[in-house]
RNA sequence: GCUCCCGUAGCUCAACGGACAGAGCAACUGACUUCUAAUCAGUAGGCUGGGGGUUCGAGUCCCUCCGGGAGCGCCA
C-alpha cells in the first residue's frame, strides 16, 4: 500500500503541477473513517485553499476535474465533506494488487543503526522497569530491521560504577564473606537483590560505611584485589543472568560494551580533546565552577560540569565517549572477544581491553538510538546538542535519538500485595516508582514465572491431549506474548502504573488475543486442501460477495495494507504503541469476519476461494506485526 | 524558580490538525452438536480538567488557570 500511495502522490503532482505548486510532502494519504467517503483520502484541497486564499470546495472541484479518470481502472477520485479528495478503489483491482504483492517488503537500506537498550547495572536481578526498556528497545530494533536497516543492538554494562561497588562492599565487609565464598554463590543476581537494598539502607544511615564503600569503588577502578576480582565476577554473573532472562522473552544483543574498557582505553580523553578543539568544552568563568571544564546546554542556559576542578570526570563523560565511539569519531576501536552464545549459536560479542582478535562485523553508526527512560533526558539532550554542533545534520535527520519513555511504577495496591514497605508519603501518591535500591519492584523473572504458571492453567484446560512438555512450551509462548504486548501497548510518554490484574490478563486487548487470532487462522489453513490456496492463473472476482460481506472484506484489506505505514510512523513519532494498536484492531476486524463467514465449510467454491485469499493476506501481514513485536505464535493454544 | 511530560467513559487506554471521540476491562443481555468461546453480537456509560484564542476544521496547535508526575549536583 505504501508503494501504491507513493505512486499516486507522484502522479497527482505530475497531473496538477501545471496549475498548482505542490511539494513532495504535501500529499499524504489516510484511510477515511467511513467507507462512504472512499478508501484513501487526502486533504490536499484544504492545503491548496489556504495557499491560494480560495474556498476548499472550489479547489477540490477543480482537482477532481483534473484527476478524473486518470487512475482507472484501479481508482476513481471524488470530493466529499467540504474538501476531502477521496479515492475509491476498484475492489477487484485492489485485491489482485495485494495478492500479487503479498511477499513484498520494504527494500534494504544502507544507513547503519545502533540501538542501545537494556543497560542494567550488573549488581542485581532485572525488574519490570528494565523489562519496559528491553521490550521497547527490542521492538525498536526489530522495526528498523523490518524497514531494511542494518541494525546492531548494544547493551552497555556499567561494571565499574558505584552500584557494583555497593554490593561488593556489602558482600566483603557487611556480610564478611571471603572472595572464595562469594564465588560459590549459586544465584548471585537473586541474592544481590536483597543485599543491594540492605546495603543502600545501611549506607544512608552510616557515613563511615559510605567512606568504606568509596574505598571499595576506588579499589575496583585501580584493579586491586580482592575488590576488583569480586566486582568482575559479580558483574559477569549478573550480566549472564540478565541475558538469560531477556533471551527467554526473545530479546538478544549483538554487543556488550563495558565501561571498564572505555576507561582502560581512555576514550574520554580523546573525546575531551575533540570537544576542546571545537570550543564546546571550555573552562567555566562562573566563580562557583572555578577550575571546572563545562559544556553549555543552550535550551536551559546552563553549564554542565564535565570535568571537575580536581580533574576527574563526571557521569556524562563516559556517555559522551561511548557515543563518540558509536558514531565513529575515534580512529581507535575496542578489542573484542566472544562473551557467549545463544542456543542457536548466535554470538554475543563483548569489548575487552585485554585484547582479543575478534573484529566486529559492523561499522560506525549513521544513526544512534538510545533507549533510556525520560529521567535521563537532561543528559541525553546535552549529548544530542553536542553531536549536532560537531556535525550539523541534514534537515530533519538527527544522528542521535534519545528514544525516551516514561518509567514503570507500582500501584500502592500492588506494593501491598507484594508485602513491600510503603512509606506514609508514598501511600498518598497515585503510584510508587520502582526502585532496585529500595527493593520496591517486581523481579522480571518472577513476573515471567507468574505469567507462565497462569497461562499453563489455561493451556491445560484447553489441550488435555497434549504432552506435558508441549503444554509447557505453549504456556511459555503465551506468557512471552502477554508480557511483550503489555510493555509496548502503552504510549511511551505514559507512566505504566503496574498492576498484576492488568498485566496477567489474557483476554481482550492483550498479546494472547493476537496469538489466538493467528493460531485459529493457521489452523483453518492447515485443514484446507492445497487446491483452495492456489492463486496463479485463477481469476479473482470479489463481485460474488454479498454486500455485507463485501464491506467487511474490504475493510480488512484496507486495514492490513496499512501495516508498513504504521511501523514507519511509530518510529517517526517515537511511540511503538501504534504498532500494537494496529495489530489489535486488525485482529478485531478479522475475528468479527471469521465469526460470520465460514471458510472450510463454505460449499460455494468461488466464495471459499476468496475467503482463503483473505486468510492468506491476514496471516502474512499479522505475522509480520507479531514478529516485529517479538510475540511468538504457538501451533495451538 | 526554570525545563519537559501527562489530564479523554466507573477503571486502563486509543484517536499523522480532518469527517459521527473509539477500544479493552468491569456491569447487564445473548451465541458453543459449529473452521479453537483466550471468541463473537448487543445494552449502558462522554461539556475530551476549566477559560480564552488560531483555523474551512481543535481531544490534538497557542495563551492562561487548576490538578498530577519527572528533571534541573564538582552523585551515579
Image (cartoon, coloured by chain):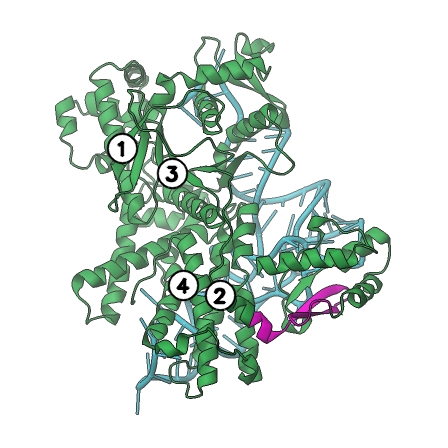
Chain colours: A green, B cyan
Mark 3 or 1: the one toward you: 1
The quarter of the rendered structure image containing the N terminus of chain A is: bottom right
The answer to whether tags 1 and 2 share a subunit is: yes
Q: Which mark is residue A339?
A: 1
Q: Secondary structure at mark 1?
A: strand
Q: Is residue A93 magenta?
A: yes
Say which mark, if any, is on residue A247.
Answer: none
Residue drawn 30% across and 45% down? Answer: A247
Look at the numbered discs 2 and 3 and tell me whether their residues touch, using CB distance below 8 Å: no
Q: Determine whether the residue tagged by mark 4 lies in a helix, strand or loop.
A: helix
In front of the other: A400 or A98: A98
> What label does residue A586 carry, if any?
2
Q: Position of residue A224 (x, y in %)?
A: 24, 14
Dot 4, crowdedness within 10 Å: few (<14), some or many (≥20)? many
* Residue A99 visible, this angle: yes
Q: Earlier in the sequence, mark 3 or mark 1?
A: 3
The residue that appears at 46% across and 77% down in the rendered structure is A611
The CA distance from mark 1 to mark 4 is 35 Å
Q: Chain letter of disc 2?
A: A
What chain does mark 1 sit on? A
CB under 8 Å between callouts 1 and 2? no
Label 2 sits on a secondary structure element that is: helix
Bounds of the magenta segment:
A70-95
Q: Which residue is mark 3?
A: A118
Question: In front here: A451 or A159?
Answer: A159
Q: Residue A117: give x, y in percent of width and height.
A: 41, 38
- Mark 3, Cα crowd under 10 Å, few <14 / some 14-19 / many 20+, is many
The structure residue drawn at horizontal position 35% and vertical position 34%, both measured from the top left corner, is A255
Q: Earlier in the sequence, mark 3 or mark 4?
A: 3
Q: CA distance from mark 2 to mark 4?
A: 9 Å
Residue A514: give its label. 4
Instruction: Give the letter of the chain under mark 3.
Output: A
Amino acid at each position: 500500500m505504501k508503494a501504491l500511495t507513493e505512486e499516486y502522490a507522484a502522479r497527482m503532482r505530475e497531473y496538477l503541477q501545471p496549475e498548482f505548486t505542490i511539494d513532495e510532502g504535501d500529499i499524504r494519504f489516510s484511510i477515511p473513517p467511513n467507507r462512504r467517503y472512499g478508501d484513501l483520502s487526502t486533504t490536499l484541497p484544504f492545503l491548496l485553499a489556504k495557499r491560494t486564499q480560495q474556498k476548499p470546495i472550489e479547489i477540490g472541484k477543480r482537482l477532481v476535474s483534473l484527476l478524473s479518470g486518470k487512475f482507472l481502472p484501479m481508482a476513481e477520485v471524488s470530493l466529499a465533506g467540504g474538501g476531502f479528495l477521496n479515492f475509491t478503489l476498484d475492489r477487484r483491482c485492489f485485491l489482485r494488487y495485494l495478492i500479487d504483492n503479498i511477499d513484498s517488503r520494504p527494500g534494504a537500506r544502507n544507513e547503519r543503526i545502533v540501538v542501545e537498550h537494556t543497560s542494567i547495572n550488573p549488581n542485581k536481578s532485572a525488574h519490570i522497569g528494565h523489562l519496559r526498556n528491553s521490550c521497547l528497545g527490542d521492538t525498536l530494533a526489530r522495526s528498523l530491521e523490518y524497514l531494511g536497516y542494518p541494525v546492531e543492538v548494544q547493551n552497555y554494562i556499567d561494571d565499574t560504577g558505584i552500584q557494583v561497588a555497593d554490593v561488593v562492599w556489602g558482600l566483603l565487609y557487611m556480610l564478611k564473606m571471603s572472595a572464595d565464598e562469594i564465588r560459590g554463590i549459586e544465584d548471585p543476581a537473586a541474592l544481590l537483590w536483597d543485599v543491594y537494598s540492605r546495603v543502600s539502607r545501611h549506607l544512608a544511615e552510616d557515613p563511615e560505611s559510605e567512606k568504606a564503600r568509596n574505598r571499595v569503588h576506588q579499589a575496583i577502578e585501580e584493579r586491586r584485589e580482592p575488590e576488583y576480582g569480586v566486582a568482575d565476577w559479580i558483574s559477569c554473573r549478573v550480566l549472564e543472568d540478565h541475558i538469560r532472562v531477556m533471551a527467554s522473552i526473545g530479546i538478544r544483543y549483538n554487543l556488550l560494551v563495558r565501561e571498564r574498557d572505555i576507561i582502560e582505553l581512555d576514550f574520554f580523553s580523546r573525546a575531551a580533546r575533540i570537544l576542546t578543539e571545537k570550543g564546546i568544552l571550555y573552562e567555566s568563568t562562573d566563580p562557583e565552577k572555578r577550575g571546572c571544564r563545562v559544556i553549555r546546554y543552550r535550551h536551559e542556559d546552563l553549564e554542565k560540569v564535565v570535568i571537575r576542578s580536581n580533574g576527574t570526570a563526571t557521569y556524562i563523560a563516559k556517555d559522551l565517549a561511548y557515543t563518540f565511539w558509536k558514531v565513529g569519531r575515534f580512529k581507535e576501536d575496542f578489542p573484542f572477544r566472544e562473551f557467549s552464545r545463544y542456543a542457536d549459536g548466535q554470538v554475543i560479542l563483548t569489548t575487552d581491553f585485554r585484547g582479543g582478535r575478534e573484529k566486529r562485523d559492523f561499522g560506525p553508526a549513521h544513526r544512534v538510538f538510545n533507549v533510556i527512560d525520560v529521567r535521563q533526558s537532561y543528559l541525553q539532550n546535552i549529548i544530542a546538542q553536542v553531536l549536532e554542533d560537531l556535525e550539523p545534520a541534514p534537515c530533519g535527520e538527527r544522528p542521535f535519538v534519545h528514544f525516551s519513555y516514561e518509567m514503570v511504577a507500582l500501584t500502592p495496591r500492588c506494593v501491598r500485595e507484594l508485602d513491600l514497605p510503603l512509606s506514609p508519603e508514598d501511600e498518598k501518591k497515585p503510584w510508587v516508582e520502582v526502585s532496585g535500591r529500595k527493593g520496591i519492584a517486581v523481579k522480571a523473572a518472577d513476573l515471567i514465572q507468574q505469567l507462565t504458571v497462569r497461562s499453563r492453567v489455561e493451556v491445560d484446560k484447553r489441550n488435555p491431549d497434549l504432552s506435558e512438555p508441549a503444554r509447557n512450551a505453549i504456556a511459555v509462548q503465551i506468557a512471552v506474548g502477554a508480557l511483550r504486548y503489555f510493555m509496548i501497548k502503552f504510549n511511551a510518554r505514559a507512566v505504566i502504573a503496574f498492576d498484576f490484574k492488568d498485566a496477567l490478563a489474557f483476554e481482550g486487548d492483550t498479546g494472547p488475543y493476537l496469538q489466538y487470532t493467528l493460531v485459529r487462522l493457521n489452523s483453518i489453513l492447515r485443514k484446507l486442501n492445497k487446491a483452495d490456496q492456489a492463486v496463479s492463473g485463477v481469476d479473482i472476482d470479489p463481485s460474488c460477495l454479498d454486500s455485507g460481506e463485501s464491506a467487511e472484506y474490504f475493510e480488512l484489506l484496507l486495514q492490513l495494507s496499512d501495516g508498513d505505514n504504521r511501523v514507519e510512523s511509530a518510529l517517526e513519532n517515537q511511540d511503538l504503541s501504534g504498532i500494537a494498536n494496529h495489530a489489535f484492531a486488525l485482529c478485531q476486524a478479522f475475528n468479527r469476519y471469521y465469526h460470520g463467514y465460514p471458510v472450510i465449510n463454505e460449499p460455494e467454491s468461488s466464495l471459499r476461494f476468496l475467503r482463503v485469499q483473505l486468510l492468506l493476506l491476514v496471516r502474512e501481514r499479522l505475522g509480520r506485526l507479531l514478529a516485529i513485536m517479538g510475540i511468538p505464535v504457538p501451533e495451538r493454544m
